[in-house]
Image (cartoon, helix red, strand yellow):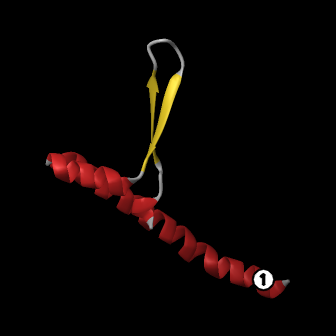
Amino acid sequence: VIFSLPFLRERAVLPEGGYEVAYYRPIFLLVSYLQMQEWYAFMLTVGFSLVVYFAASLVVAVLTPVWKKISKSI
């Protein structure tokens, strides 16, 4: 699920002024990096996605018991 979330964002300045914003899904970047054989960018994307995955899992693991304790007391 984490690899399909669009959490990578790029903002490019247009020559005539203004910005163009693009959102990327890690799974599409990973496939593109594999096709181009860009191993450093591939590993960076995998590492970043895994950090986001573990951070989200940690937040859920910590908040679940707290939420159960709060809902029992109500």
- Amino acid carrying mark 1 in the image: Ser
Q: Is residue 20 left or right of residue 35?
A: right
Q: Is residue 69 left or right of residue 1?
A: right
Residue drawn 19% across and 53% down? 34
Q: In this view, does 60 lie to the left or right of 41?
A: right
Residue closest to the far bottom: 72
Q: Where is residue 68 in the image (x, y as percent from the top left)?
A: 70, 83
Residue closest to the far left: 37
Q: Where is residue 49 in the image (x, y as percent from the top left)?
A: 37, 58
Residue drawn 49% across and 71% down? 57
Quick check: can you spot residue 23? Answer: yes
Q: Where is residue 48 in the image (x, y as percent from the top left)?
A: 36, 54
Front-most of residues 46 and 55: 46
Element at label 1: helix
Label count reads: 1
Residue labelled with disc 1: 71
Q: Work out which quarter of the rendered image holds the N terminus and state it.
A: bottom left
Quick check: can you spot residue 38? Answer: no
Q: Position of residue 67 (x, y in %)?
A: 70, 78
Residue closest to the far right: 74
Residue drawn 47% across and 63% down? 55
In this view, 29 is above or below 11: below
